[in-house]
């Protein structure tokens, strides 16, 4: 069975601090896909990034970076120089390789609060 | 460029009432999904439709039914609402043929059952 664990329920930091959101996953598939979504206070879910299991390169997009390590089954998300607008709930999600409906398994989410 | 549209955005029901949540996407996606979001539990899959004409149960299907009306529309029905179904419901869609494509979500329907 697939499972995603986000052990940090809530994180609160002061603006401009760096913050890392942890994501640990379980799967028996050798091919799989990992995602991060952002849910701002307005409630919608915004896709941030996708990572394929066969591509372990880390990725940076502006102040956001992602560290994928298959050896520890982790896909962590770091925000550098955090801003108040980064306040949101962040979800990590996992999907298997099969064609057809691509069901996502979500973690419980981490509520991030950036204080001015 | 609407993406995934859900209606209504908010609804209050009494226990035992029925209701249908509507979802439509304009991205020509094959697959559509219904999730519910409850505090501390992330999103859980209720039902999904791999393609037009097919539907399958997800993790928490009890108390719900779905209809894939056409390629664009996927509705979720509560036949006899219960307080345990108070939740935020999200519809999503994705391109079936390419397995690494993200799901795109609607803005959600906030449903309260009294």
Image (cartoon, coloured by chain):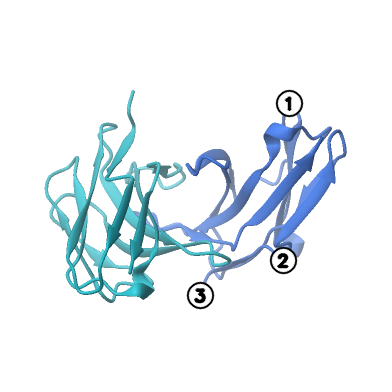
Chain colours: A blue, B cyan
Considering the image in quadrants, where does the N terminus of chain B appear? top left
Residue contact at pointers 1 and 2, CB within 8 angstroms: no
Whether discs 1 and 2 lie on one chain: the answer is yes
- Residue A62: mark: 1
Give SS at disc 1: loop
Against A20, residue B44 (above or below) is below
Q: Position of residue A30 (x, y in %)?
A: 56, 62
- Say left or right for B96 vs B87: left
Q: Earlier in the sequence, mark 3 or mark 1?
A: 3
Chain under disc 2 = A
- Depth check, mark 1 against mark 2: the one in front is 2
Q: Which residue is mark 2?
A: A7
Against B92, residue B64 (above or below) is below
Q: Residues within 10 Å of mark 2 (few under 14, many from 20)?
A: some
Observer-nearest of B39 and A74: B39
Q: Earlier in the sequence, mark 3 or mark 2?
A: 3
Answer with the quarter of the image where residue B87 lies.
bottom left
Give SS at disc 3: loop
- Say left or right for B19 vs B2: left
Whether discs 3 and 1 lie on one chain: the answer is yes
Task: Identify the residue at image location x=38%, y=66%.
Answer: B86
Q: Residues within 10 Å of mark 1 (few under 14, many from 20)?
A: few
Observer-nearest of A49 and A52: A49
Q: Which residue is mark 3?
A: A1
Q: Position of residue A3 (x, y in %)?
A: 57, 69
- Residue B92: mark: none
- Say left or right for A103 vs B75: right
Q: Residues within 10 Å of mark 3 (few under 14, many from 20)?
A: few
The answer to whether one can see residue A44 in this image is yes
Q: Earlier in the sequence, mark 1 or mark 2?
A: 2
């Amino acid at each position: 069975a697939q499972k995603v664990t986000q052990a940090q329920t809530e994180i609160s930091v002061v603006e401009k601090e760096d913050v890392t959101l942890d994501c640990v996953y379980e799967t028996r598939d050798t091919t799989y896909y990992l995602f991060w979504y952002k849910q701002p206070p307005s409630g919608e879910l915004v896709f941030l990034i996708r990572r394929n299991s066969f591509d372990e390169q880390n990725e940076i997009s502006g102040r956001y970076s992602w560290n994928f390590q298959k050896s520890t089954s982790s896909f962590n998300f770091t925000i550098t120089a955090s801003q108040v607008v980064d306040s949101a709930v962040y979800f990590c999600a996992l999907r298997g390789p099969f064609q057809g409906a691509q069901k996502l398994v979500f973690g419980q989410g981490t509520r991030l609060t950036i204080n001015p | 460029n609407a993406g995934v549209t859900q209606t209504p955005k908010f609804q209050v029901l009494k226990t035992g009432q029925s209701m249908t949540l509507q979802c439509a996407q304009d991205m020509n996606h094959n697959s559509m999904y219904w999730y519910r979001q409850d505090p501390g539990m992330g999103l859980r899959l209720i039902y999904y439709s791999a393609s037009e004409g097919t539907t399958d149960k997800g993790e928490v299907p009890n108390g719900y039914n779905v209809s894939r009306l056409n390629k664009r529309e996927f509705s979720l029905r509560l036949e006899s609402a219960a307080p345990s179904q108070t939740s935020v419901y999200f519809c999503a869609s994705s391109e079936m043929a390419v397995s690494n494509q993200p799901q795109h979500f609607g803005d959600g329907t906030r449903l309260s059952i009294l």
